[in-house]
Image (cartoon, rainbow, N blue to C red):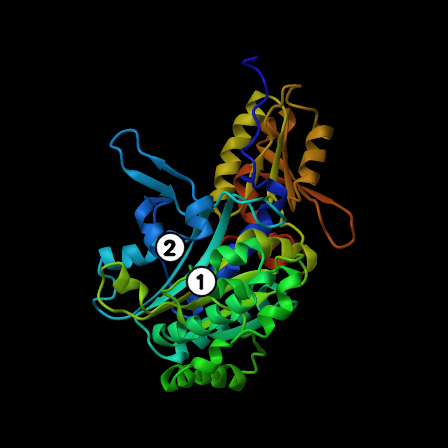
Amino acid sequence: MSENKKITGVKGMNDLLPQDAHLWELFENTAQSVVQAYGFQQIRTPIVEETRLFARAIGAVTDIVEKEMYSFTDSMNGDQLTLRPEGTAGVVRSVIEHNLVYEGPKRLWYKGQMFRHERPQRGRYRQFHQFGCEAVGFTGPDVDAEMIMMCRRLWDDLGLDKIRLELNSIGDASERAAHRVELIKYFEAHADQLDAEAQRRLHSNPLRILDTKNPAMQELVTNAPKLLDYLGEASLAHFNGVQKILNHNNIPFKINPRLVRGLDYYNRTVFEWVTDELGAQGTVCAGGRYDPLIETFGGKPTPAVGFAMGIERLVELMKTAGEPAPGNQCDVYLVHQGEAAQLQAFVLGERLRDAGLDVVMHCAAPTGAGSFKSQMKKADGSGASFAVIIGEDEVANHTANVKAMRDEAGESQQSTVPFDGVVDFIVDHITDGGEEHHHFHVHDENCKH
């Protein structure tokens, strides 16, 4: 094999290219702003954890652990490690390890890469990114409703109106156990209608059969015993409390009795935000309460609820809703010709950046530095509001030509400005003419690009 053969990316692990970066930044900045408005704090956990963390959290007999996890043996010490397939397990491990709820409940948010070896499809990849929240130490229906309302605010802020809420309660362990017995009896009585996947799950995880996408089994699962009929007084009160808050705040939802979680540590409230805009795999955010999990991991009994959303899926949805225009690459583009002009351009560039402006310096390509005409084309393509032009004459006169690239009349205006006055000249035009020059943006702690 030739050593120079082109190397391509690993299947299902994609590059984020510059033309999409503005959408990712928009989503991440908006999501962070929304959750911080509700008092959530960021937590970051490692991409690699011990394999047994996920085997315990997700379940050793699940598809994720059996087929999809990227697990390996550390050749240095023999440890069994895994690239994280989801975010909750690592957050819970960190909460216990650092005793984060010692002083009281915590609202936490995270984002980052996750890894699952599954068939890549639109918005679902082998390396994917999640944004999620975990509220740890809260026991009532109020925080469940808060989580859901927080998601609704995010969709509104992103301009996504084709996402709907599905809601259910899966009760507590004893209620699920009673339901499980009846569910197995029901499916055993109709074993001839079960596909291979359902037969495999019949005794290990029968709840997951209710979530089948097989059209031939839809009538069967619709008529199956419903978990809602097995809920006790406390579980019903909790579920009704969630619904009451959502109804009072005009959050529409549909109760979906088939909405389940196949893992034992989930309890009571489960919810999904779904859309028809991305094909058959319509879930963009899934959440639920998992009160037993922290104790399962060796911590003190601690209630918790959380959700996670796939960023790739939401970026796809943002595109279908009408892709926002990317922001300008810069405020100022520095055009120069000659060594002395280049040196002065560097000086002006740093002064402009000190003033909070985004500045792109024209640098040489393999074909050369480029003529003034070709550099001005680059300046125009950058979306810059101003081009600062320096040549031999400007160096001799200690001046720069400052060209306003984007006035409302479509005509560019050019001014000769002393080197020492360039920064003030541009900043004054931005602050005085902000209504006319829509592309200007000066950095500020409270300013979002």
SS of the residue at dot 2?
Answer: loop
Left or right side of 37 for 388? right
Q: How many other residues sit within 10 Å of disc 1, few (<14), some (14-19) or many (≥20)? A: some
Image location (x, y in percent) of residue 219: 64, 70
Q: Which mark is residue 114?
A: none
Q: Are marks 1 and 2 in contact (CB under 8 Å)?
A: yes
In this view, 390 is above or below 1 = below
The x and y percentages for residue 423 are: 54, 45
The answer to whether any part of residue 444 appears in the image is no
Q: How far across and down, in percent of the image, does residue 156 sit? A: 59, 69
Q: Quadrant of the C terminus?
A: bottom right
| Residue 17 visible in the snapshot | yes
Could you tell me the amino acid type at mark 2? Gly
Front-lying residue, 66 or 111: 66
Front-most of residues 392 and 435: 435
Q: Amino acid at mark 1?
A: Gly
Disc 1 target residue: 262
User: Residue 128 location in percent, x, y?
Assistant: 51, 47
Please determine whether, in this image, residue 63 is positioned above or below residue 250.
above
- Residue shown at 37%/67% (left/top)? 290
Q: Residue at x 41, y 48 (%)?
A: 65
Which type of secondary structure does the marked residue at label 1 adopt? loop
Per the image, the residue denoted by label 2 is 59
Report the side of 331 relative to 260 (left or right): right
In this view of the protein, which residue sits in the foreground, 295 or 46?
Answer: 295
Compute the Cα span from label 1 to label 2: 9 Å
Residue 80 occupies quadrant: top left
Q: Which mark is first along the chain, 2 or 1?
A: 2
Q: Residue at x 45, y 50 (%)?
A: 64
